[in-house]
Image (cartoon, rainbow, N blue to C red):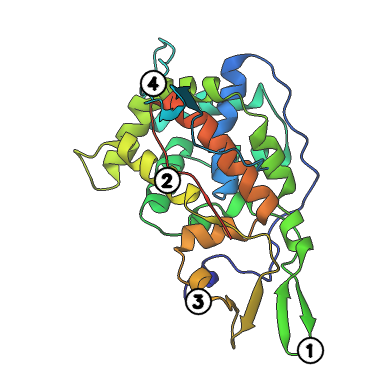
């Protein structure tokens, strides 16, 4: 299968330990987790408690009138001297290690060019592609599994639970602090983005597109049926198979985790000054 093969569904790549939601410490340290956990779940990487993106209406003279929503100004970053892009790894490692020694975090921090990797993952998602090939260090442990009932194959819910820890940790991120960290590192993130081939491109627009791509991923509460090809599995539902590789990657985290991730993205987006669409239930 061309796209599900982006992330092998039947292989395990890393040892696994349960992830506990990070404690709420200094705002800057909490915010630093955004870079890691967006990668892990977008890889990801993530828990999802669905919250409607619609704002409440106000009754006026017995008529329901929708209150227009003023875009919130993006949170400002800290006024610190940033090292050159090639030398930012030490800064990112220090900020993140102040928060967590979780093995997924440690695995990502052990790689190099962390900000460049972040920019590449976001661009990949914005282009509707799966970021899995750029996130090998943070793949979940445990084998992908299915349940066979006669000639019918379904995703085993145990496959979803491999992602529960990522989702729970992502849910614990302080949204405002995450936006401030992004603003702090934005000059170097933008520089890394321009290196990818768009010297005049706006990374804010790319980030908006990537978050919107994830929020458009449907939440599937019913059992998900698969078909087995000679090399892999495909979604039996043509509508699911037609989703982008990035959306199918998120979908494989399971409905609980999709809701958690999308809820946190909706929470973070206003602090980034971004208006985003909601998700789709099926």
Q: Secondary structure at mark 3?
A: helix
> Which residue matches tag 3?
238
The residue drawn where x is 42% and y is 59% is 129
* Left or right position of 241 against 230: left
Up-down relation of residue 142 to residue 151 (above or below):
above
Label 4 vs 2, first from the N-terminus: 4
Q: CA distance from mark 4 to mark 2?
A: 17 Å
* Discs 4, 1 touching: Cβ within 8 Å: no
- The location of residue 203, given as percent across then percent down, is 32, 37
Label 4 vs 1, first from the N-terminus: 4
Q: Secondary structure at mark 2?
A: helix
Q: Secondary structure at mark 4?
A: loop
* Left or right position of 223 against 187: right
Q: CA distance from mark 2 to mark 1?
A: 38 Å
Up-down relation of residue 70 to residue 252 (above or below):
above
Q: CA distance from mark 3 to mark 4?
A: 39 Å
* Discs 2, 1 touching: Cβ within 8 Å: no
Quarter of image, res 13 = bottom right
Label 3 vs 1, first from the N-terminus: 1
Q: CA distance from mark 3 to mark 1?
A: 21 Å
The residue drawn where x is 37% and y is 39% is 208
Label 2 vs 3, first from the N-terminus: 2
Quarter of image, res 128 = bottom left
Q: Secondary structure at mark 1?
A: loop
Tag in front: 3 or 4:
3
- The location of residue 15, given as percent across then percent down, is 76, 53
> Which residue matches tag 2?
212
Q: Residues within 10 Å of mark 4 (few under 14, many from 20)?
A: some
> Which residue matches tag 1?
150
Label 2 vs 1, first from the N-terminus: 1
> Which residue matches tag 4?
74
């Amino acid at each position: 299968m061309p796209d599900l093969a982006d992330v092998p569904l039947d292989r395990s790549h890393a040892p696994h330990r349960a992830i506990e939601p990070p404690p709420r410490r200094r705002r800057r340290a909490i915010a630093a987790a955004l870079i890691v956990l967006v990668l892990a779940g977008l890889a990801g990487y993530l828990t999802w408690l669905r919250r409607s993106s619609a704002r409440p209406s106000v009754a006026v003279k017995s008529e329901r009138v929708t209150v227009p929503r003023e875009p919130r100004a993006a949170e400002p970053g800290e006024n610190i001297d940033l090292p050159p892009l090639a030398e930012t790894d030490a800064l990112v490692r220090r900020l993140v290690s102040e928060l967590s020694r979780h093995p997924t975090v440690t695995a990502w921090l052990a790689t190099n060019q962390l900000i460049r990797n972040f920019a590449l993952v976001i661009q990949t998602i914005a282009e509707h592609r799966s970021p899995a090939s750029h996130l090998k260090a943070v793949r979940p442990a445990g084998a992908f599994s299915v349940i066979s009932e006669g000639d019918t194959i379904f995703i085993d819910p145990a496959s979803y639970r491999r992602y529960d820890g990522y989702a729970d940790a992502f849910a614990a991120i302080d949204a405002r602090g995450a936006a401030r960290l992004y603003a702090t590192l934005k000059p170097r993130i933008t520089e890394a983005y321009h290196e990818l081939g768009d010297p005049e491109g706006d990374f804010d627009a790319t980030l908006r597109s990537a978050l919107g791509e994830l929020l458009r991923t449907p939440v599937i509460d019913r059992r998900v049926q698969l078909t087995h090809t000679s090399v892999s599995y495909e979604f039996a539902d043509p509508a699911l198979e037609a989703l982008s590789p990035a959306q199918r990657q998120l979908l494989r985290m399971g409905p609980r985790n999709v809701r958690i991730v999308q809820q946190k993205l909706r929470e973070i987006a206003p602090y980034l000054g971004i208006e985003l669409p909601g998700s789709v239930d099926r």
